[in-house]
Amino acid sequence: MLSGIPVELSAMLAAREKRARQQDAWLKQYQCPLLSFTLNIPGPVKTSPALRRAFETGLSALQEHLTGMHLSPIAQMQVHAATGDEALVAIKGDAASLKELCIRIEETHLLGRLFDFDVLTADGIKLSRPLPRRCLLCTEQAQVCARSRHHSIEELTNEIERLLSVYFK
């Protein structure tokens, strides 16, 4: 499932810089909160057909929730590259409410652990979660496990494959 084109760290860093430049341009152009959506995928393979389906599932969940809040994007774009699938959405609304919505999706959707929704205020400030995310495999904070490399890439990708298999069965 996670077979795909491996990418180098330099390509990931370049993609992150390009995403940041796009966010800066949109903040100037639209002067409203931005929502950036990617997937949390460890290891060198960042996209595959199954991961694209997970990404599209996350976008659908986001759209459903935005509709429920009577919010419509004023601009949106998607990037599909070997470095991963990305979406950027400009939304007129309260950034803190958007962040709460995104946390709710990340914490309640069956694939939510794979979703990474970042919300930036109209001033470009990235809003943080009140509580850190937990690891995909254990009860520790995800950042702590990632920094210490507590789990192997193989263990993490096996769990991601399991989640995808269960969800798309």
Image (tube, grey):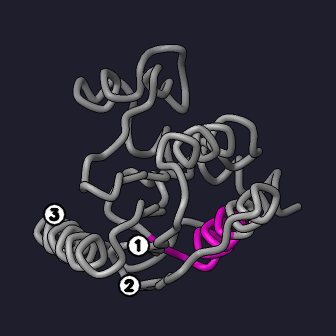
Q: Which of 60 and 53 is in front in this view?
A: 60
Specify the label residue 81 is tagged with.
2
Judged by depth in the image, the label closer to the viewer, 2 or 3, is: 2
Residue shown at 34% from the left, 24% from the top: 145
Q: For numbered disc 3, what is the local secondary structure? A: helix
Q: Position of residue 84 (x, y in %)?
A: 40, 72
Dot 1 corresponds to which residue?
Answer: 84
Residue shown at 66% from the left, 35% from the top: 107
User: Callout 1: 10 Å neighbours few (<14), some, many (20+)?
Assistant: many
Where are the magenta residues, as a range? 47-59
User: Callout 3: 10 Å neighbours few (<14), some, many (20+)?
Assistant: few
Dot 3 corresponds to which residue?
Answer: 9
Residue shown at 23% from the left, 75% from the top: 28
Name the residue furthest top: 139
Q: Main secondary structure of the magenta part?
A: helix
Q: For numbered disc 2, what is the local secondary structure? A: strand
User: Callout 2: 10 Å neighbours few (<14), some, many (20+)?
Assistant: few
Q: Indicate whether 45 appears above or below 129.
A: below
Q: For numbered disc 1, what is the local secondary structure? A: strand
**Mark 3 or mark 2, which is nearer the start of the sequence?**
3
Residue shown at 52% from the left, 66% from the top: 92
Q: How far apart are marks 1 and 3 (CA)?
A: 12 Å
Q: Which amino acid does label 3 sit on?
A: Leu
**Mark 3 or mark 1, which is nearer the start of the sequence?**
3
Q: How far apart are marks 2 and 1 (CA)?
A: 5 Å
Q: Are marks 2 and 1 in contact (CB under 8 Å)?
A: yes
Q: Are marks 2 and 3 in contact (CB under 8 Å)?
A: no
The mark tally for this picture is 3
Res 68 quadrant in image: bottom right
Res 168 quadrant in image: bottom right
